[in-house]
Image (cartoon, rainbow, N blue to C red):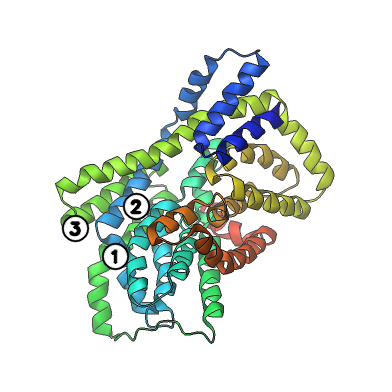
Amino acid sequence: MVALLFLIMFVLMILGMEIFASMAVSAVALLILRGDTPLNIFPATMVTGMDNVSLLAIPFFILAGDVMSCGGITAKLVDFSRFFVGSWKGGLAYTSVVVNIFMAGVSGSAPADATAVSSVLLPAMEKDGYKKPFAAGINAAAAVVGPIIPPSIPMIFMSMLTGLSVGKLFLGGLVPGLMLGGSLMAALYWQMRGKPFPQTPLKRSLKGFVLLFKDTFFALIAPLVIVGGIVGGVVTVVEASILAATYVLFASMVIYRNIGLKDLLPIFVRSAVFSSVIMVLFGVIGIFGRILATEGVAESFSQWIMAVAPNWWAFLLIVNVFFLFLGMIMDAIPAMLIFFPVLLPIAEKLGIDPIHFGVVVVVNLMLGLITPPVGGLLYILTKMSGQPFDAVAKATMPYMISMILVLLLITYFPFLVTAVPYALLGR
């Protein structure tokens, strides 16, 4: 029955149906075929799945990312990043990586970061003579860092599903996120060796830096205020998301004055629509989890995994391969919602730290955002750049390889994930 559930879901996805609709239709079809469960349980389960106050963090973080883009804050972060790396060979490509690291500290959403940064950098890179597929590829790959460096919407989901500390998950992603950024810059350097890439001379001076710092100060401290508030226990995740949205609205409307009252409605509508797509998944996933539980999937899967992976390193290898493959055919959020609660108890039985395991899974699934045929970031950059999907996907391959190397490092050297959260928040 479970095989039929996934078969129906994947067939509907291949036919072009939205993921939440594919999951809902396949679940209802299975309930009808089984005939032992009243269908009125479906709407009740959907309501229960969305009845969690922590979900309020999602629309506010998404709103913060949209406001940063429309309010000119992203452009100021681009200018600040360009001051340091813009004069390098291929400087705008390096700028994309650096500014995504800054953006990661506010929105926690890869699509939001990709849209905000690419709207500024793609026209600039085209003007400077970068090939369009290359520009789209590095902007897509750099946005992967967003949900790994805190705050992170996927890690909020993970905390809600399992009860793991969201603060520790956030901090666990800090070092891996910075390592991913470093790996992208290393891949860019390797890619540009001996090849003609645009290089723009920039006049840099202490006076120029001071003026630029003053202009971008309120944009730069946004991540520190948000992440510091969560880690320090001053605010909850929901309060932090509201703080993020309020802060960037204030900065955009009062300090930088790039947004007026007439601009707010379109921003709110976009953020609400984007948030609703994620929120409805939480409603649908409840019935999925109920079906998997009644069919005994967790127990059967656990027995199979323990048979083929008797130790922790073999288990993590299987998990990496499984989630990298899953990212090719399924969106990150539903993949995590379905499979992570099943795999976490197995990981704990093998002595794997749950925070370490959670971060490894998030990194895996975020890499899925740039793997065809489902990669969400590939579709965003295809639309924004006007380039063919396969050209953008091909352009991300060097960065995918570099990030998989980082994934292997954090998989088999757990202290890269756990050192910071346990040092600051204890075990």
Up the image or down, 182 lies above or below 155; here it is below
In percent of the image, x 44 and y 62: which residue is there?
Answer: 387
In which image quadrant can residue 297 be found?
Answer: top right
In percent of the image, x 80 and y 39: which residue is there?
Answer: 304
Q: Dot 2, crowdedness within 10 Å: few (<14), some or many (≥20)? A: many
Q: Which one is nearer the viewer's eye here, 146 or 176? A: 146
Question: x%, y% of residue 115?
Answer: 37, 56
User: Real-space Cα distance between discs 3 and 2?
Assistant: 15 Å
In which image quadrant can residue 58 be found?
Answer: top left
Which residue is labeled 2 in the image? 65
Which residue is labeled 3 in the image? 258
Instruction: Check if mark 3's residue and mark 2's residue have beta carbons within 8 Å.
Output: no
In percent of the image, x 41 and y 78: which residue is there?
Answer: 91
Which residue is labeled 1 in the image? 75
- SS for dot 3: loop
| Horizontal side of residue 237 vs 21, given as left or right | left
